[in-house]
Amino acid sequence: MAKYSEEFKMKLVSEYLNGNLGYKLLAKKYNMPSRTPLQNWVRSYKTQGVEGLKRRRTNEAYSVQFKVDTIQFMLETGASFQETAEQFRLNNPALIYSWMKTFNEQGLGGLKPRSKERPSMSKNSNKSKGKEEKKLTREDELERENELLRLENAYLKKLRAFRENPNAFHEKHKQQWRSNSKKKDTD
């Protein structure tokens, strides 16, 4: 995947916003393989300004609660990964996708930050850790199951409402999302 400088991104966003060329022609002009990055840069610029175009050099550690809030927002509003990223001021919608996938596969425990240390080579420490994890695992497992059931229930309700009346469902969620984004703008 090609990495583009902030100056290059700003140049293309400015050219798009001030010029007569659309996404496709601009991407072709600058030999980009796709117009999608340009579309994402323009969206990020519109919602976050120049900060939205900056590449974050540090791996920011997001709290479990932040990750759950992000996933919950997406499920409740029906927002896309891009819209959710904009709402929570994230530059990378794929990050939300990975959180969602991890949550579906591993539950809340999967969203917890992992230790960056090497595990101990001692056999004794592995045995004692295994016993402690088994005691906590049941509780974590029940929490995970509860959260998955809540999310599944919310998803099925949304799906049922969508099947009954797709147009009304989309309008309702567009209005909710617009009113939420207006509240953020006035703060």
Image (spheres, rainbow, N blue to C red):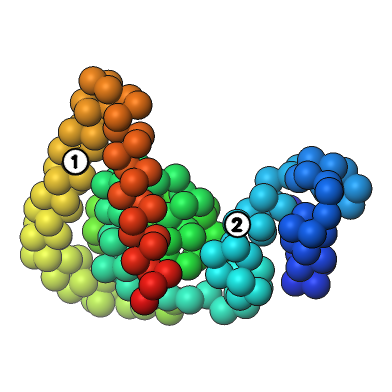
Vertical arrangement, residue 119 with respect to residue 135, above or below? below
Residue 170 can be seen, yes or no: yes
Q: Quadrant of residue 129?
A: bottom left
Q: Secondary structure at mark 2?
A: helix
* Picture quarter with the C terminus: bottom left
Residue 48 drawn at (x, y percent): 56, 70
The answer to the question of whether label 1 and label 2 lie on touching residues, with beta carbons closer than 8 A, is no
Q: Residue placed farthest to the top in the image?
A: 164
Q: Residues within 10 Å of mark 2 (few under 14, many from 20)?
A: some
Q: Quadrant of residue 169?
A: top left
Q: Which mark is residue 43?
A: 2
Residue at horizontal 17 percent and vertical 66 percent from the top? 133
Instruction: Identify which amino acid the numbered label 1 is placed on.
Output: Ala
Q: Secondary structure at mark 1?
A: helix
Q: Nearer the viewer, residue 12 or 68?
A: 12
Total tally of numbered discs in the picture: 2
CA gap between label 1 and label 2 equals 28 Å
- In-image side of 110 versus 139 (left or right): right
Residue 114 can be seen, yes or no: no
In primary-sequence order, the first of circles 1 and 2 is 2
Residue 94 drawn at (x, y percent): 52, 53
Residue 51 drawn at (x, y percent): 61, 75
Q: In front: mark 1 or mark 2?
A: 2
Vertical arrangement, residue 150 with respect to residue 6, above or below? above
Residue at horizontal 78 percent and vertical 44 percent from the top? 22
Q: Which mark is residue 154?
A: 1
- In-image side of 93 versus 7 (left or right): left
Residue 26 drawn at (x, y percent): 84, 48
Residue at horizontal 43 percent and vertical 55 percent from the top? 84
Instruction: Identify which amino acid the numbered label 2 is placed on.
Output: Arg
Q: Residues within 10 Å of mark 1 (few under 14, many from 20)?
A: some
